[in-house]
Amino acid sequence: MATPKPLAITPGEPSGIGPDLALMLAQQSWPIPLVFIADRDLLAQRADELGLPFKAFEYPCSIDRELSRGEAYVYNVPLKEPVQAGALNPENAQYVLDTLDVAIDGTLNEMFSAIVTGPVHKGVINDAGVPFSGHTEYLQDKCGVERVVMMLAKGRRKVALDRNHLPLKDVAAANT
């Protein structure tokens, strides 16, 4: 059987929990290859801080090998500035968008089967001078589509949101 196209995973804000979550994913085996679109050195640094094993295989490459615990395919996107966990830096906002762009372009060009996004800090991206209201709208714009739906999934439960980023006080009026 042919190896399925990998999932593109963008960890999101480099000083946040996203790189930690990516490394935790790399500690497990998966039925589909995962490609982390991130700074390889950031993942190695965070793995050291967390005491987790980590070995990166540069992507694109052949994805037919069995990965061991802590091994991952990484599409390297260099950070703009060094990162300290918990210390936000608007200088790295473009890095966050660059990782999303690689994932989007790769998915549209059928290099990846889908995208899994880690949490981003909208305020830091806006502080860097880039208008950003969220992943959903960013994907909508980059893909050139009119309507999008944000879906949250866990196991068999799936929830599609009717409205994105709407203050609670405005929900009733928006749905009538």
Image: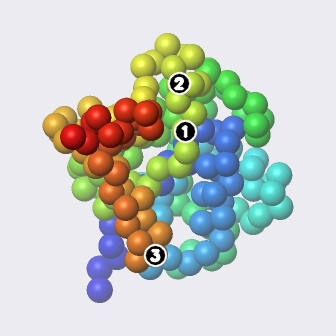
Q: Residue at (75%, 50%) from the top-left corner?
A: 46
Q: Report helix, strand or loop for mark 1.
A: loop
Q: Residue at (53%, 49%) from the top-left corner?
A: 118
Residue ID for mark 3: 155
Q: Looking at the rendering, which quadrant does residue 124 occupy?
A: top right
> Label 3 crowding class (10 Å Cα cut-off): few <14, some 14-19, many 20+?
few
Q: Report helix, strand or loop for mark 2.
A: helix
- Asked if labels 2 and 1 touch by Cβ distance under 8 angstroms, the answer is yes
Residue 116 visible at all: yes
Query: Which is closer to the viewer, label 3 or label 2?
Result: 3
Q: Which amino acid does label 3 sit on?
A: Gly
- Asked if labels 1 and 3 touch by Cβ distance under 8 angstroms, the answer is no
Q: How far apart are marks 3 and 2 (CA)?
A: 31 Å
Which residue occupies the extreme top position in the image?
Answer: 129
Residue in front for this viewpoint, 50 or 33:
50
Residue ID for mark 1: 120
Whole-percent x and y of residue 39? Answer: 60, 42
Location of residue 68 with respect to 129 vertically, above or below: below
Location of residue 14 with respect to 44 vertically, above or below: above
Residue in front for this viewpoint, 49 or 127:
127
Q: What residue type is labelled 2?
A: Ile
Whole-percent x and y of residue 28? Answer: 61, 75
Q: Looking at the rendering, which quadrant does residue 128 occupy?
A: top right
Q: Report helix, strand or loop for mark 3.
A: loop
Q: Distance between the residues labelled 1 and 2?
A: 8 Å
Quarter holding the C terminus? top left
Q: Residue at (76%, 40%) from the top-left corner?
A: 85
Residue 64 visible at all: no
Quarter holding the N terminus? bottom left
Residue in front for this viewpoint, 9 or 167:
167
